[in-house]
Image (cartoon, helix red, strand yellow):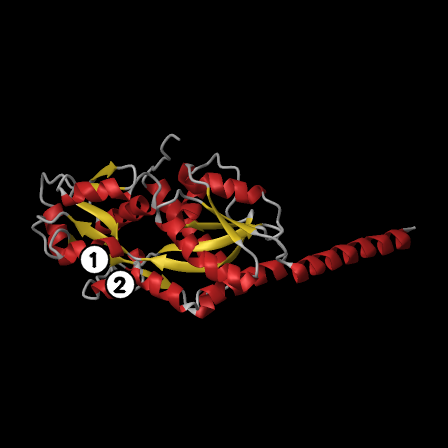
Amino acid sequence: MIRARAVAAFLVAAGLLASVAAAAQTYPSRPITMLVAFPPGGADDAIARIIQDPMQKALGQPIVVENVGGAGGTIAAARAARAEPDGYTILLHQDALAAAMTLYPDRTFDAVKDFVPIGLINTAGTTFAGRPDLPAQNLKDLLQWAKTPGQNVKVGHPGVGAFGHLADVLIMQELGLKVTQVPYRGAGPALVDLLAGQVDLSIISTVVARPLIQDGKMKAYAVIGRKRYAGLSELPTFGELGYKKLDIDFWHALFAPAGTPRPIVNKLNAALRTALTDARLQKTFAEGGMDLYPADEQTPEAAAALLKSEIKLWGDVITANHIAAAAQ
């Protein structure tokens, strides 16, 4: 009887493996839904639209982009985590997915256990910027100005939990500055008040900051990222200025629900890699201040490693600074 059960179990396992293999061979046979964790009009939506066409050409099936915004990107993540792990629902997310592990203790998903990474897409450059009439001309001058007794430095950010907020908190922590954080409903309103001098500092997308800096409407002190932005090549990174912990990237990646068969993940990864070689895509990304990851970092394993390290990074920042998610 024991032998009969073993044979039966073997046949069931073999059948499952065969069905998985068959599904992978015919995948994809219908349209794929790409959930985007933030509303239309932002960087995440733009990136989804840019990779959509070359990816669907590589896969031979349409990719339908669906924006599911809200709760710092956790609504889309929760929906993706519940989706059937068959490769027909994928998720485009970013740093906020890592931050959510600490920022939203009541979330219904685990970013590591409930997803399998498909691959890293890109990084988007950001700039540590100041109002146009700030007296400081460089970071050293800025620190001296900000530490003047009685100085109330106001920093505008796009909302609690956003990359612009968490990176700003980490920067102030590393620079040893005590500031007044001023939250806004998005990057646009924060930028408007920075230009008007209502706040002193903010983190601004490099592609948005570039013309404003060149026209003297904004000052810039450092690039937030691992390398300089080609459009502002004279602006150093924080790492070059001695703050290596601030060599952080605003990244985007694709994920699938946990349990998605590896052959299907491999097909999606191959399609993403093919899309990232598209000349038009590369030109669009470059003009938008976005950089591709090196080929050896475009693997699911590299994306998984980055996600885990980012969960620790932002978890430490959120905990150390007692940051709580805004009421939804």
* Residue under pointer 2: 229
Residue 178 seen in this snapshot = no
Residue with the most extreme right position: 1
* Above or below, comparing residue 37 to residue 262 in the picture: above
Q: SS for tag 2?
A: loop
Give the crowd class for mark 2: few <14, some 14-19, many >=20 residues within 10 Å.
many
Out of 138 and 90, give the one closest to the viewer. 90
Q: Is residue 41 above or below residue 250?
A: above
> Which residue is at the front of the view, 220 or 151?
220
Is residue 66 at all visible to an observer of this figure?
yes
How far across and how far down the image is residue 146, in percent? 13, 46
Element under disc 1: helix
The residue that appears at 42% across and 37% down in the rendered structure is 70
Answer with left or right where residue 290 lies relative to residue 104.
left
Q: Please report whichever mark, 1 or 2, sits nearer to the chain's N-terminal start.
A: 1
Seen at 20% across and 62% down, the residue is: 235
Quadrant occupied by the C terminus: top left
Disc 1: which residue: 210
> What residue is shown at x 39% (from left), y 60% (from top)?
122
Q: Please tell me whether residue 22 is drawn above or below residue 324 in the rendered image.
A: below
Q: Amino acid at mark 2?
A: Tyr
Q: Marks 1 and 2: CB-CB under 8 Å?
A: yes
Q: What whole-number distance in Å separates the C-alpha atoms at marks 1 and 2? A: 10 Å
Q: Position of residue 237 (x, y in %)?
A: 24, 61
Horizontal and vertical percent position of residue 110: 52, 44
In-front residue for pair 247/272: 272
